[in-house]
Amino acid sequence: PLGGFVRFKGENDPKVSGGLAAANPWVRLAVLFAGPAMNLFVGIILSAILFYNLGEPLLNHVLVKQVALNSPADQAGLRVGDLIRMVDNQEVNSVEELHSAIYANLGHPTQITYQRGDQVSVITLTPRDPPPEEGAIGIQMGYATKPISWTAAIPRGINAAYEYVRAVLSLPIRIFQGETGPEEGRLVGYKGMFDIYQEIQSPLWFFMVITISLGIGNLLPIPALDGGRIILILPEILIRRRIPPRYENVIHLVGFAMLLMLLLYINLQDFINPVLLPK
């Protein structure tokens, strides 16, 4: 899932008999789409496995997944497995709602209504300025889940992959409109990916995201990537004129050099400005 390089016979030279560059444009188009399509297919399979193994989230049941030792939540008596129902008598039906309600009360005593088994209880705690590696009250939030079958997991895996693709493609627009901060939408390199991997709870989810991201990235119309090669095939299909191979090779060479510089910049940023996941 971390990517791989494949060099086809006659990839850049149409004079090589039986090579990729000598094939008709539709064959080359199919070959170039095959790699990203497989990335997306594998991402769907990994997503379906996740749903089957972990169950379907119950989005109106906010679950306490971890409690930090000596945190406000720990001292107030919250435990792993508790369901958060209300904050200051206001219902919370999502992780986002709970997060917003907690951080709106930093430094102020706050009532938390939670359910443990069949018993509903109320505690009071004071959200703090979050210390490193912990949140304001010291819990990891998540959703309760219910088991589902393989037949139910597959369509949910497809939908989850679709929603992720849609989120990635709409990211530039959301950043431009101010809905998402630049830090949340930043590109990360190898160190950044490792930092994220250390923080997440599901390695399978991590590999699903990487795999789908590779599929999307390879389809971008950038020279040297599959998407860039696809763009250069289109004139041959639409107007029956092929870009001379020597010019095409120069375009890909320049694109590859720019990608290397971008990769270097992104990896340097991972050290200068390390990835910090929200708590």
Image (cartoon, rainbow, N blue to C red):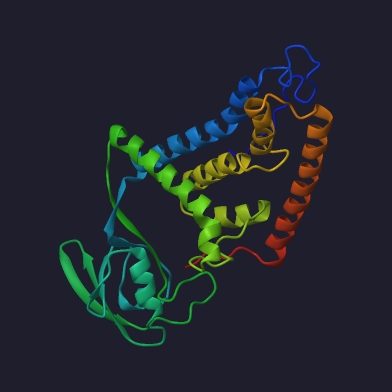
Tell me where residue 147 appears, x and y as whole percent: 27, 43
Placement of 141 over or under 1, stated as above or below: below
Q: Is residue 254 above or below residue 269?
A: above
Q: Is residue 234 above or below residue 101?
A: above
Residue that appears at 38% across and 74% down: 100
Q: Using the rendered view, name the quadrant where residue 27 is placed.
A: top right
- In the rendered view, does 87 fall on the left or right side of 10? left
Front residue of 48/162: it is 162
Q: Quadrant of residue 39?
A: top right
Question: Which residue reaches farthest front?
Answer: 239
Total count of labels: 0
Outermost residue to the left = 118
Which quadrant of the rendered structure holds the N terminus? top right
Q: Residue at x 66, y 18 (%)?
A: 24
Residue lying furthest top in this view?
17
Up/down of 228 relative to 80, above or below: above
Q: Residue 161 falls in which quadrant of the image?
A: top left
User: Residue 204's spot in the image, x, y percent?
Assistant: 48, 43
Query: Which residue of the protein is positioned furthest toward the bottom in this rendering?
Result: 108
Q: What residue is at 50 percent from the left and 43 percent from the top?
A: 208
Tell me where residue 23 appears, x and y as whole percent. Answer: 69, 17
Q: Position of residue 223 (x, y in %)?
A: 72, 40
